[in-house]
Image (cartoon, rainbow, N blue to C red):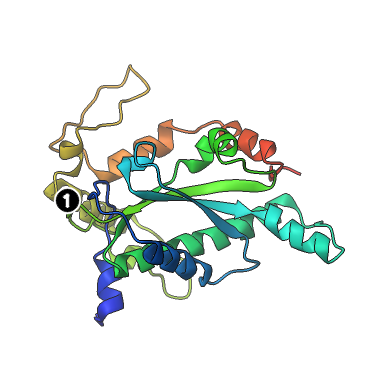
Amino acid sequence: MIKNEVIDSMMNRKSIRKYTEQIPTEEEILTVARAGQQAPFAMQLGSAIIQRNREKNAFNAPIQFIILCDLHRMEKVMKARGWKREASNIHSLLFGIQDAAYMAQNMVTAAESLGMGSCYIGAAPYMSERLRKDCNLPDHVFPLVILAMGFPAEEPPVRPRYPMEFHLFEETYPDLTDEITGYAMQIMDQGYLAQNYYKNAGFIIPLSDKTKEEKYTFDNYSWTEHISRKMAQWSTDPEELLVPLKHCDLSPVE
């Protein structure tokens, strides 16, 4: 595989949850924010709020960004031009998610180049009611993700990824046989077990069905079982997200 400074930085990226006391300079912060702006976009529907209170920030990070899908700002521009948004909420939201996600990833990459680390907090949409109140978010603005950031006080290993044949498909989607799937699962699980990831975290998602026998311990509980339990047991009610979206007047149901 080709190697250079940019590729190496991307390949070595890991989530950082412990930060030093060093606070990023204003120049560093603005550089990260400006790099986010320069990401590809459909309509520049992403914006960000910076928060500097370590006691309240995720993982006591010196700074964190709330990355927003921001239709309110675009509507202000449209109003100045004598237009009103008629594009559906689901159309607008999908493009807003793309714009905000591209922006966030550019910010992560820029921070890495400056010696900083970061961690995505994907639960931001489930915190939208509190974030709307705390950050005075207007209608048509939806928090997509929180991005904790600062200088690393830890050096965790790079986490495993699926093998390329389970990731990159040639021309058409393949038949994912049990053999191919099992191999990909083995790569992920052995990688996480070798790092003692869940053992060090001390965390196994409990079975919601108490009649089922728990067959896993920290010696064999790994990534594929962990993510399967999330997808099988959590967030089964779409109203968990539809209600916050409705409160932002951005419900995709139209």
Residue on which disc 1 sits: 190
Choose between 52 and 95: the one closer to the eye: 52
Quadrant of residue 243 within the rendered picture: top right
Residue 42 to residue 69: above or below:
below
Rendered-image quadrant of the C terminus: top right
Rendered location of residue 112, percent (x, y): 31, 65
Amino acid type, mark 1: Gln
Residue 64 left/right relative to 204? right
Residue 185 left/right relative to 252? left
Residue 26 left/right relative to 48? left
Residue ID at (53%, 49%): 144
Rendered location of residue 64, percent (x, y): 41, 49
Rendered location of residue 171, percent (x, y): 47, 75
Quadrant of residue 5 within the rendered picture: bottom left
Decide if residue 174 is in sight here.
Answer: no
Rendered location of residue 8, percent (x, y): 25, 73
Rendered-image quadrant of the N terminus: bottom left
Choose between 213 and 243: the one closer to the eye: 243
